[in-house]
């Protein structure tokens, strides 16, 4: 009991001390770097709109709340592919995300996990001031990648926590940036059947990063007629830090083993507007799940002042195929859709293998 009270105290103090730090302002919005860290790569949790801070489970918890990784029973492998905003950007292929995740239980209480997310934009024409015509300077293929290693631990049957170490990489042919960040989260569940859940997660805490490379330099001639190479110094970019606070409740029905989960979430962004989210998940016979959510922020309905392409609606479904009668081995197929203003929506497809 003392351990439970101690952990709950840490949760409360963390929120109270972090709230002023994460409270952004209009002057800081849009100035963060590595904003791909704000894009959910997983098909399952993205249909929640990322509001499942309290009830995230398995590898999907890497994005929502790493504490949920502790619910991996043995071993999980997940692959997800997302077509961003219709996938229109490059010449040969569009903007897309591929994510691979693996989690393995260590002992009775710990789970070790890792995942890699890569984001590509296809081939893009290189243009310069001297040669502005597309195609005259070839093409480039920007890529963004982050490697995540996590450990999650169950302190009791009710309290679970975890942390993630991230390595961030952004690059083109001659310019790149590298950084590191950490996430941390905790979940608490209570009730006769653990139907009431709470969660808190801190994301993208780390030092600023900046771009460098040969692309930041150019050759010029000074007044004395000497040739020299000059390198620009890129400004440092802070990471898009945020704080999630969420809760969920499971309504359980014995007939056909039905479950209806209602979840709510508040996101305090340091460099973006804060979000409020509400959603649900319906489960039938542990074989089919459908979910939908809505994220709201100030001016989301105003085309002139909106600061996000996403218009708030997300939805999706999962089909679970058991490989053993007790459900310890299964294959799950996931799909999600996220709406976007003035752009096509984002479609995500994924598969999870439980061994």
Image (cartoon, helix red, strand yellow):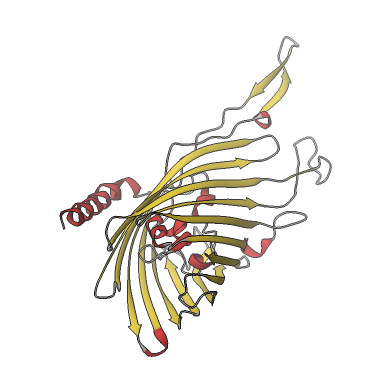
The quarter of the picture where the N terminus appears is bottom left
Which residue occupies 57% across, 37% down?
177
Which residue occupies 44% across, 71% down?
294
Image location (x, y in percent) of residue 338: 55, 68
The answer to whether any part of residue 215 appears in the image is yes
Quarter of the rendering containing residue 244: bottom left
Which residue occupies 38% across, 80% down?
260
Q: In the image shown, does 234 or 69 lie closer to the viewer?
A: 69
With 280 as the anchor, is 179 left or right in this view? right
Residue 222 in the image: above or below residue 214: above
Residue sticking out furthest to the top = 224
Q: In the image shown, does 46 or 222 lie closer to the viewer?
A: 46
With 97 as the anchor, is 355 left or right in this view? left
Q: Count how many numbered circles sit on residues in the image.
A: 0
Residue sticking out furthest to the bottom = 255
The answer to whether any part of residue 185 appears in the image is no
Residue 81 in the image: above or below residue 271: below
Which residue occupies 39% across, 67% down?
277
Residue sticking out furthest to the right = 136
Q: In the image shown, does 106 or 53 lie closer to the viewer?
A: 106
Image location (x, y in percent) of residue 16: 24, 51
Image location (x, y in percent) of residue 225: 76, 11
Image location (x, y in percent) of residue 271: 43, 49
């Amino acid at each position: 009991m003392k351990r439970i009270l101690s952990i709950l105290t840490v949760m409360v103090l963390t929120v109270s001390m972090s709230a002023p730090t994460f409270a952004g302002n209009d002057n800081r919005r849009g100035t963060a770097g590595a904003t791909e860290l704000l894009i959910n790569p997983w098909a399952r949790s993205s249909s929640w709109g990322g509001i499942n801070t309290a009830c995230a489970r398995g590898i999907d918890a890497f994005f929502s709340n790493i504490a949920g990784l502790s619910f991996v029973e043995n071993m999980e492998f997940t692959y997800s592919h997302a077509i961003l905003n219709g996938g229109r950007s490059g010449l040969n292929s569009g903007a897309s995300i591929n994510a691979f995740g693996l989690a393995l239980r260590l002992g009775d209480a710990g789970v070790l996990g890792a995942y890699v997310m890569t984001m590509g934009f296809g081939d893009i024409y290189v243009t310069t001031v001297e040669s502005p015509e597309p195609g005259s300077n070839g093409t480039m293929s920007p890529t963004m990648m982050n490697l995540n290693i996590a450990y999650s631990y169950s302190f009791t049957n009710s309290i679970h926590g975890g942390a993630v170490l991230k390595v961030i990489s952004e690059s083109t042919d001659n310019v790149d940036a590298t950084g590191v960040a950490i996430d941390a989260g905790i979940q608490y569940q209570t009730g006769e059947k653990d139907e009431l859940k709470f969660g808190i997660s801190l994301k993208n805490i780390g030092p600023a990063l900046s771009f460098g490379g040969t692309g930041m330099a150019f050759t010029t001639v000074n007044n004395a007629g000497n040739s020299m190479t000059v390198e620009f110094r890129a400004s440092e970019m802070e990471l898009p830090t945020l704080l999630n606070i969420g809760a969920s409740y499971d309504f359980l029905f014995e007939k056909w083993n039905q479950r209806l989960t209602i979840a709510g979430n508040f996101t305090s962004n340091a460099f973006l507007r804060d979000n409020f989210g509400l959603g649900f998940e319906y489960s039938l016979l542990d074989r089919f799940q459908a979910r939908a959510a809505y994220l709201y922020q100030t001016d989301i309905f105003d085309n002139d002042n909106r600061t996000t392409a996403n218009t708030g609606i997300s939805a999706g479904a999962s089909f679970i195929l058991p490989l053993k009668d007790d459900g310890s081995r299964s294959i799950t197929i996931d799909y999600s859709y996220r709406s976007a203003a003035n752009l096509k929506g984002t479609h995500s497809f994924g598969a999870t293998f439980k061994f």
